[in-house]
Amino acid sequence: MLCANLGSGDCTIDTDRFNPPIADTSWRLLSLNSVPPSSSFTKPALFGPTTPEVSVSWQSMADLSALNGGAPLPPVQSGTIGSDGAFVNGPKLKGILWSFVPTLNGAPTDGQIGPGQRNFADFASHFLEADHRIVKQYVMANWIPRLEPAWPWEYCAGCGLGHNMPWLTVADDGAVLAMGTELVLDVSHAVAPEARTLLAGGGMRVPAAEPEYRLVQAGLTRREVVIDPTTMRVVGVLGVAGGRIVGSGIESEGIEVGAARTLVYSGIRDELYAVVQPRSGEPASLRRWAAASRRWETIELLGATVEHPEAMTFHLESSALLVVDRTATEPEQHRLLRVDLASGSVTVIAERLLVGTYDVVSLSIGYAGTIVLAASQPTPARTQIAHLAFDDIRARVVDRFETTEYRLAGEVRESDAAVHLLSSDAEAHLVPRVEAGGFVAAGATEDAEEVFR
């Protein structure tokens, strides 16, 4: 039986009130094991220290409707269930579940002596807190690791996520889930419908190169653009406003893409840059998409040739792109290039930034304005990270970190707390982070040549 907030709320537990018919408005019989609540339901049970627990099924949804005048309930789906587990604008019942053992060995329990010379009726009642909160379970197979997009915590202010909740996904029922290493949260309430559509659309999401605080200082709500990876059309923008993730669709032109492309987005400029390599072995070209025109344009490159681009970021202060590429003549040699966006001039900042075989290379803007360079080698497995100081003609090493515990699986990002990265190894659900104390300072004048040895 259930005693809930239906009438007087008098939930006194007394055997006289257990026997049907029940006259008061507090206690109600329940639908158990598909038996309607027209009569008391009983189930045989054994008592003893080694006997199994007794359980019955409860048709709670049917009772929830019946206890509220028989009104039909809305479907159980994202948007109909509130954060308290109850239906939005629907019935909210909380109370006590009570079961009673009326007979023992065919005789009334009252008066029979049980263990410890106690009247068996004293412990023949069983009750616990009960409610109608709805809990949904999602099968997480193949959802972790999520290698891209990288870091929803950079724009999901309304979700209240920490740095260990780096994945957002939209479930089949439309619920927006934030996933961490040990926890999944339904954050649908913090995601506007237009943003949910973009998140579920399967587009490639390109986050702003600028750190979150720079976008906030500039008073900007946008955080990343969403593109169609096949046509390179920008289809939408995601951002934060009013404590929620918001989004809007965009109609724009696409471009033909070739063998390789490397992308970076400036949230402050609201421009997307793509280094496109038409065919393997051919020089790369630079394209720019501007939100103002919603069109792509070609920036003619002068000076050094961009050969095989592997990583790129946008440097606001110098109005330039920083690109890591490999040369055709020396495939294990990685250079650091500066591309001036005003003139298209390409300058080699470091001729031998990296030398060796690297399966993943990442370049991003650090929290304090430095450049974060990260790279992984497959055999033997090794990941290295360095902060680089940069000016128009030179880069130098500030500090380094090295580990053999995991390899990179995507872009590295830095927050005010640490450098965060995704791992592609067996423990890929882990989200490694390297705090400031994990880095070893470099020499004061060490140039960024062969940064990782």
Image (cartoon, rainbow, N blue to C red):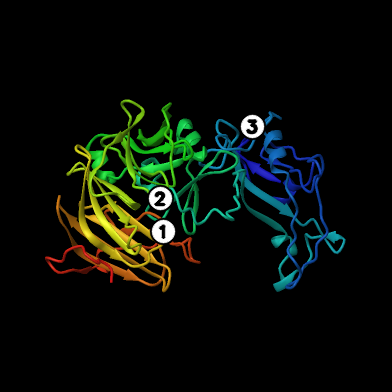
Closer-to-camera residue (370/41): 370
- Locate residue 6: give its quadrant: top right
Q: As displayed, is residue 185 above or below residue 330?
A: above
Mark 2 residue crowding within 10 angstroms, few (<14) / some (14–19) / many (20+):
many
Q: Amino acid at mark 1?
A: Leu
Q: Which residue is mark 3?
A: 74
Q: Is residue 125 left or right of residue 369?
A: right
The quarter of the image holding the C terminus is bottom left
Q: Which residue is mark 1?
A: 422
Q: Picture coordinates of residue 15 (x, y %)?
A: 73, 51
CB-based contact (under 8 Å), mark 2 and mark 1: yes
Q: Picture coordinates of residue 104 (x, y %)?
A: 82, 62
Mark 1 residue crowding within 10 angstroms, few (<14) / some (14–19) / many (20+):
many
Going 70% across and 62% down the picture, which residue do you hit?
A: 123
**Distance between the Cα atoms at labels 2 and 1?**
8 Å
Q: Which residue is mark 2?
A: 150
